[in-house]
Image: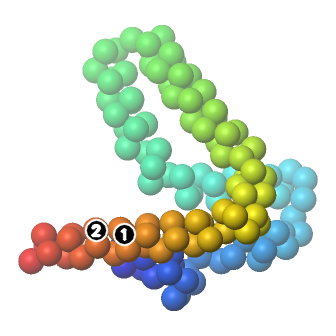
Amino acid sequence: MVLMALQTFEIFTFIKPTYLNTKNTKKGYIGAFLTGILAGIFSSPCSTPILVVLLAIVGQSGNIFFGILLLLLYSIGNSILVVITGTSIGLVKKITKSEKYGKFSNYLKYFMGIIILLFAFYMFYLGF
């Protein structure tokens, strides 16, 4: 968590800037496949616990059609979130380029960095 706060304060850069990611020369099916693999790796810590719980519920009920329905509804909900995220990137870029919202964005960035840092210190305190 301390590393996340340092990334937020831009003291250290652990995640590459987005302009380096746009230099991808892979196009077509191979580029889409590699992008999908990376997206799966990065989203796995968030989606795996939900999938384990869903599969446990399906295994306990023993009904295959109930399992198909649960996984179908989960995939639709997850896909809607991905589509909303992908389509809102342009809006976020437009807002962050504005001077009016640029100062607010900087204040918000530092405020959230302080929150993350305080939470990290609290977790360290609980560990001792």
Q: Amino acid at mark 1?
A: Ile
Residue 90 rendering spot, x and y as whole percentages: 78, 53
Query: Looking at the image, do the residues carrying marks 1 and 2 touch, with CB atoms under 8 Å apart?
Result: yes
Q: Quadrant of residue 38?
A: bottom right
- Residue occupying the point 67% across, 40% down: 84
Q: Quadrant of the N terminus?
A: bottom left
Q: Which residue is mark 1?
A: 116
Q: Amino acid at mark 2?
A: Phe
Decide: is 10 above or below 126. below
Q: Which numbered tag is attached to residue 57?
A: none
- Residue occupying the point 21% across, 70% down: 123
Neighbor class of circle 2 (other Cα within 10 Å; few <14, some 14-19, many 20+) is some
Locate residue 13 relative to residue 22 in the image: left or right. left
Locate residue 9 relative to residue 15 in the image: left or right. left
Locate residue 90 relative to residue 55 in the image: left or right. right
Task: Choose between 19 and 92: the one closer to the eye.
Answer: 92
Q: Which residue is mark 2?
A: 119
Decide: is 109 above or below 86. below
- Where disc 2 sits, the SS reads helix
